Image: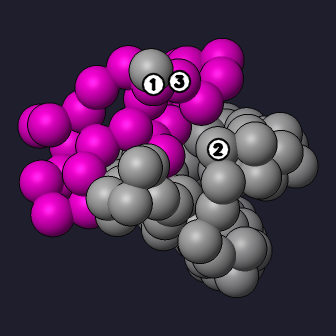
Amino acid sequence: MFTIAEARAELARLRPVLDEIVALRADAAELGAGESSLGGLPEFKAAQARLDELLTQVQQTGAELKGFAPLLVDFPGDLDGVPVLWCWLEGEQDLTWYHRADLGFPARRPLP
């Protein structure tokens, strides 16, 4: 369980990892499509292996990786006795959203 402050601090620590995931995701997509100036099958496999390592790093923090394209990371928490997920979506600069744990992304709301 994360307080909102702890979730924000963990997100800040994860930002370099998340940025690398975004870059590698694009490289892997290009490499997987065929001919690329980035290389061939060995580079594709290397990108996939590195992505696996990075995704594992995210999950080892206690954060929940809910989406890959775009990245969606949830941090389990509690808001006034209600289980929630502090919710970060790729492209957002800070952790400013949450949703009840039982409702998921469609019930996303700005933090009070």
Image quadrant assignment for residue 50? bottom right
Q: Is residue 25 magenta?
A: no
Mark 3 touches mark 2? (CB < 8 Å): no
* Residue 90: % across, % down: 50, 31
Residue shown at the point (38%, 20%) measured from the top left: 110
Mark 1 touches mark 2? (CB < 8 Å): yes
Mark 1 touches mark 3? (CB < 8 Å): yes
* Residue 8: % across, % down: 73, 40
Quarter of the N terminus within the rendering: bottom right
Q: Is residue 49 above or below residue 101?
A: below
Which portion, as a residue range, is magenta?
A: 86-111
Q: Residue tagged by mark 2? A: 4
Image quadrant assignment for residue 112? top left
**Residue 44 visible in the displayed image:** no
Work out whether mark 1 precedes mark 3 in sequence or the reverse, and give the earlier one: 3
Q: Residue tagged by mark 3? A: 96
Of helix, strand and loop, which one carries label 3? loop
Q: Is residue 90 magenta?
A: yes
Q: Closest to the observer: 53 or 29?
A: 53
Q: Residue tagged by mark 1? A: 111
Mark 1 and mark 3: span between their CA atoms? 5 Å
Work out whether mark 3 precedes mark 2 in sequence or the reverse, and give the earlier one: 2
Q: How is the image coloured?
A: one colour
- Could you say which disc has been placed on residue 37 in the image? none
Horizontally, residue 60 falls left or right of residue 105, namely: right
Mark 3 and mark 2: span between their CA atoms? 9 Å
